[in-house]
Image: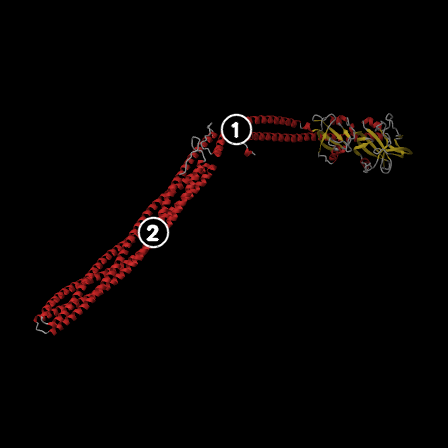
Amino acid sequence: MFNKMKLGPKLMIIGVVLTIIPLVILGVSAYLQNRTAIEVSKSESIKLAYTDLDHIAEGVYKMAESQQEVLEKQMLHSLNVARDIVKRSGGFSFTEDNVSWTAINQYTKQPSLVKLNKMLIGFTWLGQTREASKSVPVVDEVQKLTDVTCTIFQRMNTGGDMLRVATNVLKEDGSRAIGTFIPAINPDGKPNPVISTVMKGQTFNGRAYVVNKWYITAYEPIFDVENNIVGVLYVGIPQESAKSIRQAIMDIKVGTTGYVYVLDSEGHYVISQNGKRDGEFIWEAKDSDGNLFIQEMIKKSLKLKPDEFAEQRYPWQNPGDPKARYKVARLKYFAPWDWVIGAGSYEEEFLAGTNRIEQLGQRANWIMAVVAIVSVMLALLAWYFTSRGLSGPIVNIADSVRKVATERDFTVQVPVTSSDEVGNMASEFNNLLRQLRDSFKVVNTSAEDVHAKSADVSGRAAANKERAEAEVKQVEEIARVLNDMGVTAGEVAQGSAAQKDAAEESSKAISELLKAMEAVAESTQKQTDSANDANERVTVMGETGAKVVATAEKQSEAVLTVNEAISQIARSVEEMNQAAKRASEHGHSALKAAEEGSDSVNATVSGMRAIAESSEQISEIIGVITEIAEQTNLLALNAAIEAARAGEHGKGFAVVADEVGKLAQRSSEAAKEITQLIKDSTERVSEGTSLTDQLQTALQRIGEGGRVNMQAIEEIAKTADVLALRTEEVNTLMEELNTLATEIGSMAGQQGPRREAAQQALAALVEQSQYIAELVSNANQGAQTVNNEMQSIVERTGQMQQMTGMQVERSKNIREIAQSQAEGARLTAERAGMVLAITNEMQSLSKSLTAQVEQFKISGNGSDQQRQSQ
């Protein structure tokens, strides 16, 4: 309830409560002090009153005790006087004559008829005189002398009942109380103390009930000559007849209206206020509450010891009193006279001072209550204006806070109307709003920066991803090319091996060709020699035709042998030509593969360099991403701090800033991972580039060797072609020689006219043989050159095969590096995708952060500062 109240009422309530509480505390303290003082005063007054009452009761007790002693002594003196008068009158004696008496019990008033001997004093019968006006011996004389009552008792029976036979004690009707007796046993069944004392032969001196009232008495037994108790001599005075003590008691004033009274144990007034109710029976008297207070007082008093007091407090309402008032009595019991001495008065009289103090306290309480009411009223007014003065600026601040909370308007300005704490609070609140505006501007700027930089990072990450994906494709293409290079290298190796085999076969064929050439040369030389010989024989003509024919036949056989050799040479040349062609084809394939490998290596080198450049660009981008992530993280931290400073209104910013910070952290971690991948990739690219450079050098050397081999093979092919042509010419010439030889043989058979023709033919044959020898010599030289070239080709082909094996191994290493690079590129692409996703999420969060900021009015013109997210 209190929490829902406004500040003004709260301040008023607090102020009034703070005002009332001291007043209440003061009032309660004063009230309690007054009450304590009243209670203490009352207690002390009661104590003093009780002390005074005790002193009064004790004084009455002492007066009664003193009077008792005086009266007892007086009674003993009067008894001595009475005894002396009896003695002077002749003493007591009895006659034989009986006299009838109507004996009346003084307690129960029951009569009984008795007859007793006449009792004489001297020689005079006491008679039965009832009239007070008539004189009775002894008793009246004693009364005249001592002013006390005197009675002569005659024993009625063996029980000890004593009958008054002569007395001046008067009954209520004024007659003498003769004929009444004191029973030995009282109506309550207890022995009568007077009779029991006297019957013991002792004198009773004290209070005793006489006829109808209490007396201070002295009873002395009367003995006969045989020392038997035959009667009693009595003197006494009514208890109330001691006028001095009676008047003294009645003159005692207790308080204003209080007095001292005396009751007996039966509930009779012995001494009442002013003696007005003396003898009245008040045993059944009740107080205002209906309690039998007299009985209570008597019962309490009868239990008291001589030095003890009792107390009785009871309500009493006199006729005419508006209400009952409490009376207090202090009680003391004087047993010798059976007096219940009461000293009491109204309690309010004892508490007059206390009541005065209580009245003053009540007056003070009223004054304090009035002061409290006035103070509360003044406090209400004071706290009303104070609460207005205090709550006004605070309410303005609260309204501003509510406006900030509901309208999200940070352009609110709380008016500063004072320089106190409230004014300082308003000023500080304005400073807080200004700082919040600045903070939100910083947050907004940071969000825009995050958005812009995340967009930049997103673009760079996208480009990085594209480059990484392109790099993956390029590396995969390089791997494929390297694989093809491996295949091509294998093919080059196979071609080189085939080329080597072909070159070796060509070398063998050339060796055989050289041998055949040597045989042809020998045959040609022999043919030439034979032709010259034939020519000489034809010239001599001395020989027979048979010899010519034989010679011609030998020539023909030689020609045939040469022709066969030439044919074999032609076949060898043809085989060499075919081997050269095969070597040329394999050389072309190897050269082409080497060139393709070189191109692939060049492409690989270009790809590796492109990968290195891309890695450098990616590294630069990752550096930018890392820097942006760190800046974003810092901006997110600033935004979180500002959001925390914004309190409840900055929770949304805090959540977004926390997410942006987490994304920035993730971006930084991903960037670090990508950086490590790029570092590893760069190292592998460097290693691959080194290997590809070596491979490129090897391929260039292989290409150069292949081109040299191709040139040699082409030269061999050309030489083989020329050699084949020459061989065909030699073969043709040999055929012509064979024909000529045949013709020569036929011509030799004619001998005569044809000798000249034979000589011409032989000359032509010699000439042709010499020409063939030259051709064979040239062919031999060409074959020797070809053989040398073939040996060089074999050696270079072996080197190419070895280099091709190295190329295969390097291609394998480069392929492994390319595969590792491809894996790194794929990881880079994946990380770039993660960075792209993170930056996209950062863009989304920055948009959310910007949207959160745009919900607040932070510009001074009262309109929201709208910024479009880029």
User: In which quadrant will I find the C terminus?
Assistant: top left
Q: Is residue 408 left or right of residue 365?
A: left
| In-front residue for pair 449/509 | 509
Nearest to N terminus: mark 2 or mark 1? 1
**Residue 170: image x %, image y %?**
84, 28
Query: 669 above or below 181?
Result: below
Residue 640 visible at all: no
Q: Would you name the residue on which mark 2 appears? A: 475
Nearest to viewer (mark 2 / mark 1): 2
Query: 542 above or below 465?
Result: below
Question: For the residue marked with disc 1, what is the amino acid?
Answer: Ser
**Residue 383: image x %, image y %?**
54, 28
In three-dimensional space, the C-alpha distance between marks 2 and 1, rounded to whole angstroms, equals 82 Å
Residue 63 visible at all: yes
Dot 2 surroundings within 10 Å: few (below 14), some, or many (20 or more)? many
Residue shown at the point (24%, 57%) measured from the top left: 706
User: In which quadrant will I find the N terminus?
Assistant: top right
Dot 1 surroundings within 10 Å: few (below 14), some, or many (20 or more)? many
**Residue 218: image x %, image y %?**
80, 32
Query: 191 above or below 367?
Result: below
Q: Would you name the residue on which mark 1 appears? A: 387
Q: Which mark is residue 868?
A: none
- Cβ atoms at labels 2 and 1 below 8 Å apart: no
**Residue 384: image x %, image y %?**
54, 27
Report helix, strand or loop for mark 2: helix
Q: Quadrant of residue 336?
A: top right
Q: Quadrant of residue 334?
A: top right
